[in-house]
Amino acid sequence: MEDVEDDGWQMVETKGNQFIVNSQPFYVNGFNTYWLMVMAADQSTRGKVSEVFQQASSVGLTVCRTWAFNDGQWRALQKSPSVYDEEVFKALDFVVSEAKKYKIRLILSLVNNWDAYGGKPQYVKWGKAGGLNLTSDDEFFSHATLRSYYKAHVKAVVNRVNTFTNITYKDDPTIFAWELMNEPRCTSDPSGDTLQSWIAEMAVYVKSLDAKHLVEIGVEGFYGPSAPARAQFNPNSYATQVGTDFIRNHQTLGVDFASVHIYADSWISQTISNAHLQFTTTWMEAHIEDAEKYLGMPVIFAEFGVSSKDPGYNSSFRDALISTVYKTVLNSTKKGGSGAGSLLWQLFPEGMDNMDDGYAIVLAKSPSTLNLISLHSSKLAIFNSMCSWKCHWGCKKKNALETIIYHDDL
């Protein structure tokens, strides 16, 4: 594919509760593939990156969320604080340059809450190795030295000059947004104050380095102490105790849009049932309402899926879940609401079974899911072109928004 023309490849911005590019609406239909950098670090597996981008592009997916971290692990990007493997950094360069070729924008997550790919436990290990007296992984959020480790990593990534494109990351429109952390939790402080303090500091810090790109937190969307009336929407009572606080967290200076994850099979029950679909709709509608009423920003459902390892799983249920998410997003979009898009967890090419956590969607093996994704992409493409829309059914509506409301078949 030819490179995207630079004059049409501008930064994603927000305007009220919507994303815009070149002053036109930008609705997100996307996916997660977390392992892109690690696979790109080896020439024998680098082709998998191109493969997944090509397949995603072919069904109209336009945004990919992936890791811009791998701390102290196999094929580590950051081998120790501020010490990087240049070959792995070049692999991330490749991911960014390849994404642009396929007109896919990237949400780059900067650290993990969990121990996969290092995460906050690795930062604590580094701190202990440096002589710090640390007793909890949650001190990642509160200890000044660990905060400085994280800031140094953010600075290294944001200021990186891509060895393939010669474009500094902070100037590259291929990057949709920076994500502070994948699924931050601070269970040692259920009040939420510790995590809130970290979010407030880091959001402003990222913006001080890069005022052009959007910033989001990466939280799962659980309601906390600041909004007791919303706790009824949490999937379980434990969710109120993990130190996150959806509304409060997203009212922080420097945070541009909200993120929510959806895992009924982890949070409610592993056994597949229609209750999962009911929860998904209610969970999404609650957060869309909050984004409109309290936050005035877009919300992306940044991870959702169902595991093939769940009791009672079948591909028809997976399609029903995906349809539920897509329909709820579209219902908001039609009204000009805050529901701005969703990202499947997760898209895989063939031959990657060893990396599958049960949630992998291989389009070549899933024709019904492929059709579902393509159809949703087509609908969002109409919204994305609403400023220059001309209805091919011949109705007299002024734009795509009115047209889609008018035509019930959409």
Image (tube, rainbow, N blue to C red):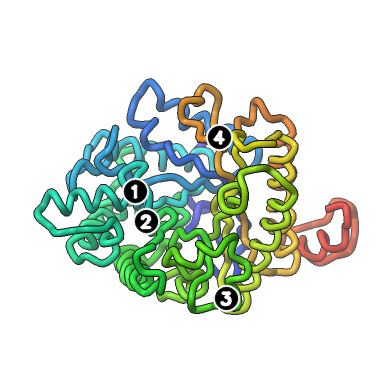
- The answer to whether residue 378 shows anywhere in this view is no
Q: Are marks 1 and 2 in contact (CB under 8 Å)?
A: yes
Image quadrant of residue 16? bottom right
As helix, strand or loop, the secondary structure at mark 4 comes to loop
Residue at 50% in and 62% down: 238
Q: Nearer the viewer, residue 382 or 185?
A: 185
Please report whichever mark, 3 or 4, sits nearer to the chain's N-terminal start. Answer: 3
**Could you tell me how far apart the alpha carbons at marks 3 and 4 are, in whole angstroms?**
35 Å
Q: Nearer the viewer, residue 350 or 388?
A: 350
For disc 4, the marked residue is: 358
Please report whichever mark, 1 or 4, sits nearer to the chain's N-terminal start. Answer: 1
Label of residue 296 in the image:
3
Q: How many marks?
A: 4
Does 39 appear above or below 401? above
**Could you tell me how far apart the alpha carbons at marks 1 and 4 are, in whole angstroms?**
36 Å
Mark 1: amino acid? Ile
For disc 2, the marked residue is: 171
As helix, strand or loop, the secondary structure at mark 2 comes to helix
As helix, strand or loop, the secondary structure at mark 1 comes to loop
